[in-house]
Image (cartoon, rainbow, N blue to C red):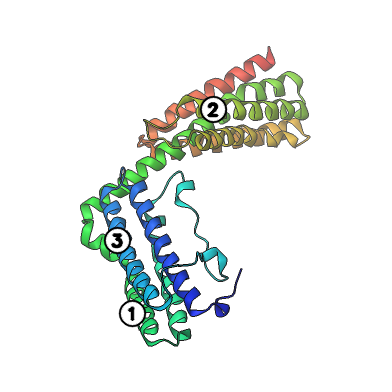
Amino acid sequence: MRNFDELSEREILALAIGNEEEDGRIYADFADRLREDYPATASVFSEMAAEEGEHRRRLIDLYRGRFGEHIPLIRRQDVRGFVQHPPVWQSRTLGIDAVRRQAQAMEAETQRFYRRAAARSTDASVRKLLGDLAEIEAQHEHTADKLVAQNVPENIRHEEAEAERRLFVLRVIQPGLAGLMDGSVSTLAPVFAAAFASGKSWDAFVVGLAASIGAGISMGFAEALSDNGSLTGRGAPWVRGVICGLMTTLGGIGHTLPFLIAAFWTATAVAVVVVIAELGIITWIRWRYMDTPPVSAAMQVGFGGALVFATGILIGNS
């Protein structure tokens, strides 16, 4: 990598051209990725991409007049000090707020670059253009917010926020909740059956650990293979599978860990308290994200948990 201070005027202009082209393509990628779920915001980034294209054209015209037709390929990653932006195409999901924050960071970074470049230039025309672009980028540091205010009415912003919330529920909350419920409830029977059958904390812990990890692997594969997300909009299957598998394991491990306590009845009492806490968390998630009335959610989750818990105790004592 080269230091910025080591670049010649020709190289600085080439880097500026590359930056504008890259920024324009990033904004175009934002627009393309957001168009299906957030069409109003997508139009904002299409406009920003067009502006970056105009900046690029002005820089190329100046470069041709000074240095000819060949523009060397100099990229951000070739020069120290630039922020490396994650490729948009590698992102499975894009949140509106995260995209706007990245756009603001890009504009601020470009503004600082043009100011430093203008300060180093000795040619009047180059210095003037770079200074003008720095001023434009300074005005554009809040471009995303300004364009949103102009192009995205409050009701559209509310609709997009609701759409983003729905996608979050589909892609994160639903697989996570399914895993947590399965891990917290389905492992109750084997854990407490082993506990009361053996009367030993360690035996219950081993069974609970095996049941939790096994259920996590099973639920993870089941979630990942159930839907590729292409029609339902539920996102990448492997991401949902990982979320579901981890939450399943976590749900089972929660009431398994108390059985590391050697005293059997103490371990059992702590495990029961953990189970109640797990069912409370599940109830809260269903109320908060799934619009289930809290009393109804508590009764449903509590009834299911009690049945499985009783099953484990009955089998363990048989």
**Which of these two is toward me, 64 or 142?**
64
Which residue lies under the disc numbered 2? 182
Q: Position of residue 318 (x, y in %)?
A: 68, 11
Give the numbered dot on residue 45.
Answer: none
Which residue lies under the disc numbered 3? 50
Q: Amino acid at mark 2?
A: Asp
User: Callout 3: few (<14), some (14-19), or many (20+) C-alpha neighbours within 10 Å?
Assistant: some
Q: Circle 2 sits in a helix, a strand or a loop, which is it?
A: helix
Q: Nearer the viewer, mark 3 or mark 2?
A: 3
Asked whether the residues under the numbered discs 3 and 2 touch, taking CB atoms below 8 Å apart as contact, a structural biologist would say no
Which residue lies under the disc numbered 1? 132
Q: Can the viewer see residue 105 in this picture?
A: no
Sequence order check: which comes first, mark 1 or mark 3?
Answer: 3
Sequence order check: which comes first, mark 3 or mark 2?
Answer: 3
Asked whether the residues under the numbered discs 1 and 3 touch, taking CB atoms below 8 Å apart as contact, a structural biologist would say no
Left or right of residue 228, residue 128 in this image: left
From the viewer's perspective, is residue 155 above or below residue 179?
A: below
For the residues marked 1 and 2, what is the alpha-carbon distance in whole angstroms?
60 Å
Q: Position of residue 51 (x, y in %)?
A: 30, 65
Q: Nearer the viewer, mark 1 or mark 2?
A: 1
Left or right of residue 236, residue 151 in this image: left
**Which of these two is toward me, 122 or 276?**
122
From the viewer's perspective, is residue 2 above or below residue 46?
A: below
Sequence order check: which comes first, mark 1 or mark 2?
Answer: 1
Q: Residue at x 37, y 60 (%)?
A: 24
